Amino acid sequence: MTLQGIPESDIGRNQPAVSSSSRARRGKLPPFIVNYFSNPLSVIALCCFALIVIFAFIGPHLWKYQFDVFTSDNSAPPSPDHPFGTDSTGYDTLSQVMRGAQRSIQIALSVAIIATVLGALVGSLAGFYGGVVDSILMRTVDLVLVFPTIAVAAVLAFMTMGTQTSWWAIAIVLAALAWPIVARLVRSDALSIMQAEYISAARGLGASDWSIIIRHLIPNCMGTITVAVTVLTSTAILSETALSYLGFGVQSPDTSLGLLISQAQNAVSTRPWLFYFPGLFIILIALSTSFIGDGLRRALDPRQSRGGRA
């Protein structure tokens, strides 16, 4: 039988085409994004870090108290007016945690970006040229890795105390000690990439060394570089905390999460909120960036997630 002259067997033949078109549109998402968002823990970590960034950078503009202006409430426990309580001089802890998280994130991201750029450049040059260049650069990397990070950072940070750019100086010091890790990772990738046929083709077409490094080598190392950024962010948060705890980090009247913990260590038994709230944010930032890095590693190399998720 037919419907208005169309055989029943032909009815709905176009429906699969529509479905295929819909699937094609969905398939336009890069596999990297699909792989990342298929990992619930990585998505939760990304949302958590985004909320902390909003809290740190937008929160101070919305909250009624400033981090460097004391109130009449001294040593007040958490309350509706002061959700995180106040310290012995009346400073609102919530506003101080906002400022501390802002400074800590700024330092951590600065360290991650500077160290990653420097490490990626050194690692690419070592992997590209090999031979004497590789030996010199890798011995330099080994030399820097020998230095005790916290001890050297403490000495160098002490030399910049009292300056208006002290947090920038701390970031540069930590980055100067962190880049060798990235250099080693990128060099390892670069050595294998240099054996690829498209590198030989680029050489045959007359591409310059820098053109090959910028257009072919570094883009193919982006998986390693992207993961390194998140790992360094987490490491820098903990390093900054250690420096501030030792008294060599951010100085008053400015503040950071590490400095807040350092200032509250003697009040843990009497005013525990001064210690636990900054500590909670340090843990959240470190864990969220670590899980973001793990999600990026799985997304960039799906083989990592085969065999089940532990």
Image (tube, grey):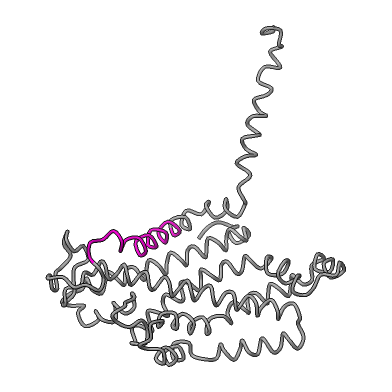
In percent of the image, x 47 and y 63: which residue is there? Answer: 291
Q: Is residue 2 left or right of residue 97?
A: right
Judge by depth and name the residue closer to the eye, 191 or 178.
178
State the residue in front, 97 or 235: 97
As drawn, which residue projects farthest toward the front?
164
Magenta stretch bounds? 45-65
> How many numbered marks appear?
0
Task: Assess whether residue 52 is covered by the magenta stretch.
Answer: yes
- Looking at the image, residue 273 sits to the left or right of residue 16; the answer is left
- Helix, strand or loop for the magenta stretch, by majority: helix
Residue found 19% across the figure and 68% down from its top: 85
Q: Position of residue 271 (x, y in %)?
A: 18, 74
Expressed as whole percent of the image width and height from the top left, the position of residue 304 reads: 60, 62
The image quarter in which residue 307 lies = bottom right
- Residue 72, quarter of picture: bottom left
Please determine whether, in this image, residue 266 is positioned above or below residue 31. below
- Residue 254 within the segment the image draws in magenta: no
The N terminus: image quadrant: top right
Give whichever of 240, 64 is nearer the camera: 64
Q: Position of residue 245 (x, y in %)?
A: 33, 83
Where 71 falls versus 244 (above or below)? above
Q: Nearer the viewer, residue 54 or 200?
A: 54
Left/right placement of residue 86 relative to residue 141 reads left
Q: Residue at x 62, y 51 (%)?
A: 30
80 to 104, vertically: above or below: above
Asked if residue 62 lies left or right of residue 201, the reply is left
> Residue at point 70% right, 81% down?
126
